[in-house]
Amino acid sequence: MVDEREEERDSTAAIVILYVDYFTAVYFTIEYAVRIGTTPRKFHFFVQPMNLVDLFAILPYFINMILDHLSEFHIIGKAGKVIETFFVVVLAWPTKSVLWCTTFSSR
C-alpha cells in the first residue's frame, strides 16, 4: 500500500517536472525568436556572447527532442544516446567558456 502511494507520488512529480521542462523550453524559444525578429542587425545579434549563450541553452532541448523521436522509430538506438551526450557536452562547453571570460574580463 505504501509502495503504491510512493510510486504515484513519484510519477506525479515526474509529470510536473516534464511540464515545467516543456514550458521553460517553449518560453525561452519564443523569447529568443522574438528578439531575433525584432533586432535590426541580425549578424550583430548572433555574434554577441550572451545571445550565443541563450542559443546554446535552448539547443540541447531540441537536439534531445529530435533524438528521442528518432529512437522511437528505431532509427537510432544506443548510438543516439552517445550522440545526445556528445551534443550536450559540446554545446555546454562554449557556454561555460563565454561566461568565464565575461566574468573575469569585467574586473
Image (cartoon, helix red, strand yellow):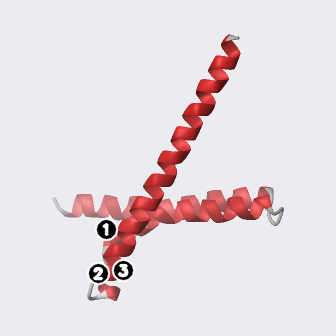
Most distant residue in the top direction: 1
Q: Hey, what amino acid is under mark 1? A: Met
- Residue sitting at 79 percent across and 55 percent down? 78
Q: Amino acid at mark 2?
A: Thr
Q: Which residue is mark 3?
A: 46
- Residue at horizontal 69 percent and vertical 18 percent from the top: 4
Position of residue 58 measured from the top left corner of the image (x, y, whole percent): 47, 63
Q: In the image shown, does 74 or 9 lie closer to the viewer?
A: 9
Q: Is residue 30 left or right of residue 11?
A: left
- In three-dimensional space, the C-alpha distance between marks 2 and 1, rounded to whole angstroms, equals 17 Å
- Front label number (2 vs 3): 2
Looking at the rendered image, the quarter that the N terminus falls into is top right
Residue at the extreme left of the image, as rendered: 107
Q: Is residue 30 visible?
A: yes
Q: Which residue is mark 1?
A: 50
3 left or right of 92 in image: right
Residue under pointer 2: 38
Q: Gap between marks 2 and 3, in whole Å?
A: 13 Å
Dot placed on the residue nearer the N-terminal end, 2 or 1 = 2
Where in the figure is residue 36, as x and y percent of width and height?
Answer: 35, 79
* Circle nearer the viewer, 2 or 1: 2
Q: Which amino acid, mark 3?
A: Phe
10 Å crowding of disc 3: few (<14), some (14-19), many (20+) = few
Q: What residue do we see at 68% from left, 63% from top?
A: 67
Q: Is the C-beta separation of discs 2 and 1 under 8 Å?
A: no
Q: Is residue 93 visible?
A: no
Residue drawn 37% across the image and 70% down it = 32
Specify few, some or many for label 1: CA neighbours under 10 Å numbering under 14, 14-19, or 20 or more: some
Position of residue 33 measured from the top left corner of the image (x, y, whole percent): 39, 74
Earlier residue among tags 2 and 3: 2
